[in-house]
Amino acid sequence: MPPGTETSTDVESAFARWLTPLVALDASDRRADGSVSLRRFGYVRMLTCASGPLRLVRGPRPAAPDTEEAVALLVPREGAARLAQDGRGVSVVPGESALVDLRRAFTVEHEGTARTLFLRLPLHALHVPSVPLRSLTARALPPPAGSAAVLPALLGHLETSAPRVSAPLGERLGGLVTDLVAGLVEDLAEDTEGPAEDDRHPLVVTIRQYIDRHLGDPELSAELVAAAHLISVRYLHRLFEAEGVTVGRLIQRQRVERCAGELARRGRSSPSIAVVAARWGFRSPAHFSRAFKSVYGRPPQQWRRMVMSGTADAPGTRV
């Protein structure tokens, strides 16, 4: 079998190993039969499940502490899929897709013969950590438009050509797929979270945009942010009380997330960890290592090796 490709007729076991622990039942609540194929493209996993009537149930039990935080894009190929998560339910038909948070309880049901693709991506790689996933799951996404319109064709190509894709090319294609999915998620966030953004103090929105533009500046701090907006540091902290994070903590977390996204996406061709850390405003490798571990639970060197290995237990858990 070509590298990066696996198949299994044990539906429940395959999903538990490659996607997330769940129970797979048929229409009679017995163990489901079917076939699951796995294709790897760097840190992206593409699972295709072909079966008869099927119900996948991910219970409320928390994931193991070393389990990577991940989401899945559900893409029906044949037959409709009924997805329920976070108090919402939606029917997703071929041509549409939906987002699933793999850390929390959900169900996916097929009433008849179906073939469904699950695209599993590490949460950090989507580069949208500030978006509350609870507001984005179980919503039908229409066919993508704009630059993301190439995603359906790309996924179809990857499904059929995986055996002929080399590991280095697979990593690059996985990064491209991630960028396109991230665009879909950002569009969905704009549709679902406009009122919440409007409820913020306008200056908070402006300051967050300022921080985002200046993350690479080692001098960026609460004092610099306050001075740039002609307010006191005390007033700046008051503005961010409702955000649930201090300005200093926000700057550090966003810097770490930018570094993680760059280290993971570029794979074997990425620059050194020290170069990436400096690019995003860290003054020393030691400072970056401590900050990275506080967010992802492991030093960047170890985390990066495990992401590049593509193993099922590659940790990316944030603490």
Image (cartoon, helix red, strand yellow):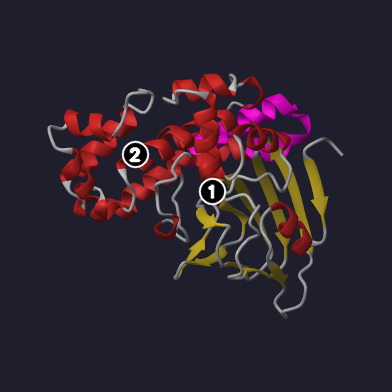
Nearer the observer, 122 or 51: 122
- Mark 1: which amino acid? Arg
Quadrant housing residue 55? bottom right
Q: Say few, some or many: other residues with alpha carbon within 10 Å of mark 2 (under 14 / 14 to 19 / 20 or more).
A: some
Q: Tag 1, which secondary structure?
A: loop
Q: In the image as oriented, which residue stretches furthest toward the right? A: 1
Q: Give how far apart the Cα atoms at labels 2 and 1 are.
A: 18 Å
The answer to whether 309 is drawn above or below residue 143 in the figure is above
Is residue 259 located in the magenta-colored stretch of the structure? no
* Quadrant in which residue 113 is drawn: bottom right
Q: Which region of the structure is painted magenta? A: 156-181
Instruction: Say which mark, if any, is on residue 259.
Output: none
- Tell me what residue is drawn at x 51 percent, y 44 percent: 295
Q: What kind of residue is marked 2?
A: Gly
Q: Which residue is mark 2?
A: 248
In the depicted structure, whether residue 181 falls above or below residue 271:
below
Which image quadrant is residue 235 in?
top left
In the image, what residue occupies the spot 56% across and 40% down? 293
- Of tags 2 and 1, the one toward the viewer is 2
Give residue 66's position: percent from left, percent from top. 66, 52
Whether residue 145 appears in this view of the structure is: no
Per the picture, the main secondary structure of the magenta-coloured stretch is: helix
Q: Is residue 170 magenta?
A: yes
Q: Which residue is mark 1?
A: 318
Query: Is residue 17 shown to the viewer in this render?
Result: yes
State the residue at coordinates (55%, 31%): 176
Q: x, y (%) of residue 84? A: 51, 68
